[in-house]
């Protein structure tokens, strides 16, 4: 009596087909996903034809039909993988998978901003947003922004930020120039971390007053030859870089830590305050460089660190 093992031919054909697909993708640089989506239904056709073939011939001769469970499970696994691929394609997730596999992390230059402050402008109000920011004073009359940001995309794909308006809002109202950094758009893709990194530098004329709303972001200030007063509120870690000829007084109020050159800070012990039992005492201090004709007021900051360049 002859025994037919249904499933062995199907598994053999599946292995041969899968090997051919992998070989073609290696040497012919063919998209493997596209081939698999088109090829996998043939496995079920071969398995069904094999069952019908052996059932038909088992009637004409003495034979015993036996199903090869391992082979059928292997064929079924390939079929399930194909069904999953179809579902991913119909839902649009397959395109995201392809894009994620072929994408790369890259650092891109911000669209630059450079514009004269304009006649009659006396102060700048800055909302730094949630990203680290460096603010410098300059001798030019223009306000400029430059920097970089990280994004995931194809090698030759268009950058996420194409215009200044994509990340920056600039508006004039009377004698005040309002500048606000926007939150960057976050694409809804598989390998995106849900956040984006941006590092920018803002250069403003030294003779303009400046008010910064930090939103707990880390800030770096380089006042250089400051010719007006600056005010910083609610920043995270604040680093101030001073030159030897800087003429500035830093007035810190409500900071967790005051750091810098030894004996540089004059701590006002009488004005320290404690918000609650779980909070540490807030420190108030003065740091003077030169005669201190221009004041940098820092309010409600985690820590202030002074560096001498």
Image (cartoon, rainbow, N blue to C red):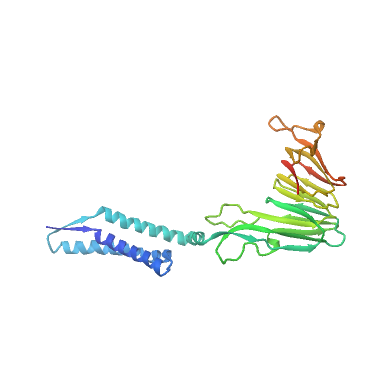
Q: Quadrant of the N terminus?
A: bottom left
Pick whichever, 187 or 140, lies toward us: 140
Q: Is residue 62 left or right of residue 70?
A: left
In the image, residue 298 above or below residue 184: above
Residue 192 percent coordinates (x, y): 55, 54
Residue 277 percent coordinates (x, y): 70, 29
Which residue of the protein is positioned furthest toward the bottom in this rendering?
A: 28
- The residue lying at 42 percent from left, 60 percent from top is 85
How many numbered markers are drawn?
0
Instruction: Answer whether residue 286 is visible to the viewer in this image.
Output: yes
Q: Is residue 129 left or right of residue 210?
A: left
Residue 10 percent coordinates (x, y): 27, 61
- The residue lying at 28 percent from left, 59 percent from top is 11
- The residue lying at 36 percent from left, 66 percent from top is 23
Q: Is residue 160 left or right of residue 263?
A: left
Q: Quadrant of residue 237?
A: top right
Q: Quadrant of residue 251?
A: top right
Residue 267 percent coordinates (x, y): 80, 35
Which residue of the protein is positioned furthest toward the top in this rendering?
A: 277
Instruction: Answer whether residue 44 is visible to the viewer in this image.
Output: no
Pick whichever, 244 or 190, lies toward us: 244
Q: Quadrant of residue 283?
A: top right
In the image, residue 299 above or below residue 86: above
Pick whichever, 19 or 46, lies toward us: 19
């Amino acid at each position: 009596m002859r025994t037919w093992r249904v499933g062995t031919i199907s598994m053999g054909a599946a292995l041969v087909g899968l090997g051919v697909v992998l070989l073609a993708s290696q040497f012919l640089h063919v998209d493997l996903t596209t081939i698999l989506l088109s090829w996998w239904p043939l496995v079920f056709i071969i398995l069904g034809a094999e069952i019908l073939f052996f059932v038909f011939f088992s009637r004409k001769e003495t034979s015993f039909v036996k199903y090869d469970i391992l082979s059928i499970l292997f064929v079924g696994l390939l079929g399930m993988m194909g069904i999953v691929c179809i579902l991913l394609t119909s839902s649009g997730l397959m395109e995201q998978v392809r894009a994620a596999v072929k994408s790369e992390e890259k650092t891109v230059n911000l669209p630059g901003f450079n514009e004269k402050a304009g006649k009659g402008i006396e102060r700048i109000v800055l909302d730094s947003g949630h990203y680290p920011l460096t603010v410098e004073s300059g001798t030019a009359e223009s306000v400029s922004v430059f920097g970089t940001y990280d994004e995931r995309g194809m090698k030759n794909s268009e950058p996420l930020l194409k215009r200044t308006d994509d990340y920056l809002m600039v508006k004039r109202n009377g004698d005040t120039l309002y500048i606000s950094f926007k939150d960057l758009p976050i694409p809804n893709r598989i390998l995106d971390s849900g956040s984006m990194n941006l590092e920018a530098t803002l250069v403003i004329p030294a003779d303009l007053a400046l008010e910064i709303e930090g939103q707990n972001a880390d800030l770096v200030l380089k006042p250089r030859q400051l010719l007006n007063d600056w005010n910083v509120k609610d920043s995270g870690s604040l680093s101030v870089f001073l030159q030897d000829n800087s003429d500035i007084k830093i007035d810190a109020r409500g900071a967790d830590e005051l750091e810098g050159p030894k004996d540089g800070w004059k701590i006002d012990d009488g004005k320290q305050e404690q918000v609650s039992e779980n909070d540490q005492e807030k420190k108030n201090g003065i740091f003077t460089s030169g005669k201190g004709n221009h004041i940098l007021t820092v309010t409600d900051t985690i820590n202030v660190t002074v560096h001498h360049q």
